[in-house]
Image: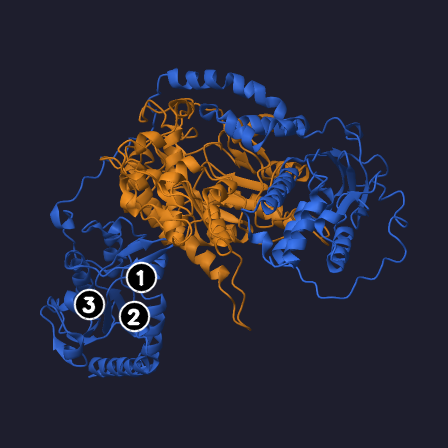
Chain colours: A blue, B orange
Amino acid sequence: MQSVVLAHQVDFAGWRDAARRLALEGVAPEGVHFSVGAPDDLFAQAGDAAPDDPPPPPSGSFTVSRSLVELAQTVIQAREPERFDLLYGLLWRAQHGERKVAELVTDPAVQRAVRLAQSVRRDTHKMRAFLRFREVPPEGTEGDASRYVAWFEPEHYIVEANADFFVRRFATMLFSILTPYRSLHWNGTETRFGPGAEPSEVPDDDALERYWRAYFSAIFNPARLKVSAMRSEMPKKYWRNLPEAAAIPELIRTASRRTETMLEALPVDTIDPKPRRRAAAPEAGPALGIVEAEPVRPGTVAELAQAAAACRRCHLWEPATQVVFGEGPADARMMMVGEQPGDQEDLAGRPFVGPAGQLLDRAIREAGIDRGTVYVTNAVKHFKFEPRGKRRIHAKPDLVEIRACNVWLEEERRAVKPALVVMLGATAARAVLGRAVTIGRERSQPIALPDAYGSNAQGFVTVHPSYLLRIPDEDTKQREYAAFVADLKQALALVNS
Amino acid sequence: MDLLAKLEILADAAKYDASCASSGTEKRDSLGAAKGVGSTEGMGICHAYAPDGRCISLLKILLTNFCLYECAYCINRQSSSVRRARFTVDEVVRLTLGFYRRNCIEGLFLSSGIIRSPDYTMEQVIGVARTLRVEHGFRGYIHLKTIPDADPLLLEEAGKWADRLSINVELPTEGALKQYAPEKDMGGIRRSMGRMRLGIDAAREKTRAGAAKPPRFAPAGQSTQVIVGADPSPDRAILRMSSTLYGAYGLRRVYYSAFSPIPDASAALPLRPAPLLREHRLYQADWLLRFYGFGVEELATDALGNLDLVHDPKLAWALENRQMFPVDVNSGTREALLRVPGLGVKSVDRIIQVRRHRGLRMADLARLRLSLAKIAPFVTALDHRPAAELDSARLSAKLAPQPRQLALL
């Protein structure tokens, strides 16, 4: 039986080197026992714990999966004397045909290691959570900084591995963390480990602790008493070092009385200086989803946009963020009508700002049109979508919605009086022309409008830019884009004629 | 009024906000810093638990509980007789840094009653965050409550200092909001959420070389809270709302807060508090929507649209969809395994990991610390096939929790 004595409880390097040597020498787990040098004399004899000339490792290839290394680094912190042997057993198996042994989480030995690792991680987490510093004001000359001292009782050997966390967080403070087996001191530039300490080495009180206790008591809601939930996350063994825990018994004892008092007290009628604007619960709309609505009065674009913000003519308003009204000069010669706002337009409250809008901008530029002279709007002014996890998927507006929204488009046309209405896609064409339109058959030519709303406007149909975005084949996409730009050029010529 | 009394009043006033998360922000630390303190490393830390079982991660306070609004469910509404107080910026800064240095908190969650105007209030709240970050080099977590329809420039600055921003939708429908919170407006809340999403997305976008870096904006995203049981909306309506909000605004979380009795309650409210179990079921359903591939309309509810209080939502779904079971743990797809009652995301991933190497028996599942009683009727393993359980009319009763446990909740 070979015996390996490690320098201290978390001597990972010592274990790793010995394990590597033993495995290459072919020493089976049954033939090895690891232990830690007693007493834990890391500090008393830093130099002579390790032999001056460690035996050179035997040659041979030796690779260990990353998951096993990580498991070993965690398990080595566990307060379990057998952990080194357990890990050597896993390492041995990894070298003998079970390279991914760490993944066999239902294997009894792996399971034991995984449980130990979980326990170490939990302890680590609790140390970061429940350790409390007390401030020790400077004694000496002015300008000296306070020191912060904490006492914590970890279940495992986790102080060393946790040092970096506390240093990253409190790098600008001078602090010491004292535990029964190890102490950690940070002087602002380096970390020093020392032997275990006594709780009496931490000051008794701290000026801010009663504030913290007051906060803890006030944030507690007595109407939701759930003592077992608290204790499963913050077990009683931690309470003696938590300043706020002193308040717990009283909070529990008085909780039900405080709640009863609240429930028994007669509700107070609101004493409101202003008359209450109390709206009745909204009623379901009649069939077809059309909600009775006030007639729309003609007005300027700004007035229309304001009126439309409260539109309830169909049910699309409900899940949407906002109405996305048309935008552009009030006397624009060209009006472009799209289908409906998309995700980005709905968030921003402006038409054509998303991917399709960016493509439209590009095409407009290439067609020689000044974007600032065009009034852009949509046939439907709310975004219609299906929620799909973390995204909203565009849904095509149906006839009911297009008709319900048409009143706004009509009023926009009446207000702007464009010379040309460019319909982008089938929904826009349907809304403006009042009939089903096949884009391929009717695009690229002037179309008479059924109602010109006080102007002598012409219509013009082309594709919607989002159609171009959806074409998978690159060549077709290029060709269709060029046709779209050509259409826009033709539209410009119609406006100028 | 002394600071201790203010702290008591303004923490008490903040406790009805359920959010406590301090996770998911960028990595920061104080190494090499000349001044300041703090770090954030992805995972938040719960520094204490109150006897209501809720985690205490942040110093959660109101800047003031004076408020112009008259929201019926709120302890701080204008007509409430609650004691009022107001912190100065310096007081909040001192408390935050003091508690942080003692390792009591991960940071600050600051909200406020509406005083003078939404913009004025927002400026005050931002002032605290700015002072902490700029003057004191504070690198801990900051969550700011945003006031709906505050000036977009103020929102921009709030996003610059805060890790997380939030606006509470408060109630599930516009009608309920009108009735219980007459000064609030669902449209304004959604517009602000939309603006925040655009800011968050822009800040996350990878910058092309040479392009200006987008301004920092709430790296931990946005969240919201809805009060359950103050209005008659059923669970399905609430979950539909959540699903819309997750999709539209990329929220990290929707918090559900069972309407809880408050001192000096308004007559407009229901007489009894909503059961905490209902809140729990909503959280379970919310998880199913976000991590288990369920859709809102699939969830089993009663005729009114409320989730079952006896069975958790996944089990309730399984009992209504028995034809989907049993699922073979050795060959079932990840999607199918996620729908097995008693299997969580982690267990499913472990099962998939192990079965690449060896076939699974029931003892293996027990070693994964799974409840065999709960999963046995719904799975097959090398040495197990469910008997007639799936056809049994008594399965539902058999899987119901013991009445004693139910009473405790």
In percent of width and height, residue B400 lies at 35, 30
Looking at marks 3 and 2 on the same chain, the residue that comes earlier in the sequence is marked by 3
The residue that disc 1 covers is A342
**Residue positioned 27% across, 53% down in the render:** A306
Residue A132 relative to residue B253: left or right: right
Between residues A455 and A383, which one lies in front from this camera angle?
Answer: A383
Q: CA distance from mark 3 to mark 1?
A: 14 Å
Query: Chain letter of disc 2?
Result: A
**Residue positioned 86% across, 57% down in the render:** A54
Q: CA distance from mark 3 to mark 2?
A: 13 Å
Residue A89 relative to residue A434: left or right: right
Residue B280 in sight from this viewpoint: yes
> At label 1, which amino acid type do we have?
Gly
Q: CA distance from mark 1 to mark 2?
A: 10 Å
Crowd around label 3: few <14 · some 14–19 · many ≥20 (10 Å): many
Crowd around label 2: few <14 · some 14–19 · many ≥20 (10 Å): some
> At label 3, which amino acid type do we have?
Ala
> At label 2, which amino acid type do we have?
Ser
Q: Is the residue under label 2 in contact with that under label 1 (CB below 8 Å)?
A: yes
Query: From what the image shows, is residue B371 above or below residue A375?
Result: above
Labels 1 and 2 positioned on one and the same chain: yes
**Residue positioned 34% across, 35% down in the render:** B181
Between residues A44 and B289, which one lies in front from this camera angle?
Answer: A44
**Going by the picture, which residue comes out furthest to the left?**
A450
Q: Nearer the viewer, mark 3 or mark 2?
A: 2
The residue that disc 3 covers is A428
The residue that disc 2 covers is A466
